[in-house]
Image: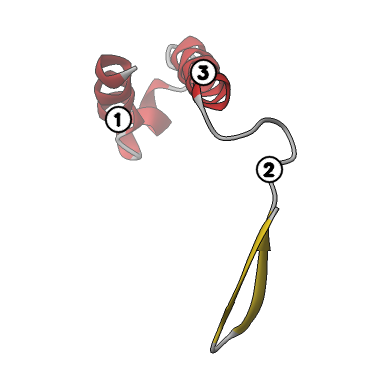
Amino acid sequence: MAHAEDGGGLHFEMSYLFPEGAALDACRKTTAQCGVCALAMYRPLFRERYDILDITGLLDHLKRDL
């Protein structure tokens, strides 16, 4: 646990799941991949809405980075 005091008050930071590192990075990446996969599965059903919100373009961009 770490704490810091600044002009706005006292802030505490605590890592509940894992210490920072490779394990947490892998969990974050896997979570992002699951989210992108779920959105991609619903694309055929909601094609108009995805196009209006430009989610199709964002998904293609996210897939390249994951």
Q: Check disc 1 and give the amino acid type.
A: Leu
Left or right of residue 46, residue 62 in this image: left
Labels 2 and 3: the sequence-earlier one: 2
Provide residue 33's location: percent of width, then percent of height: 47, 16
Mark 2 or mark 1: which comes first in sequence? 2
Q: CA distance from mark 2 to mark 3?
A: 15 Å
What numbered label is drawn on residue 3?
Answer: none
- Seen in the image, is 16 located left or right of residue 2? right
**Image quadrant where one finds the C terminus:** top left
Q: 1 or 50, which is in the foreground?
A: 1
Numbered mark located on residue 26 in the image? 3
Q: Are marks 2 and 1 in contact (CB under 8 Å)?
A: no
Q: Position of residue 63 (x, y in %)?
A: 32, 16
Q: Amino acid at mark 3?
A: Ala
Q: Is residue 55 above or below residue 35?
A: below
Mark 1 is surrounded, within 10 Å at the Cα level, by few (under 14), some (14 to 19) or many (20 or more) other residues, namely few
**Which of pointers 1 and 3 indicates the residue nearer the eye?**
3
Q: Which residue is mark 2?
A: 15
Frontmost of labels 2 and 3 is 2
Q: Position of residue 9 (x, y in %)?
A: 64, 84
Across the whole image, how many numbered discs are drawn on residues? 3
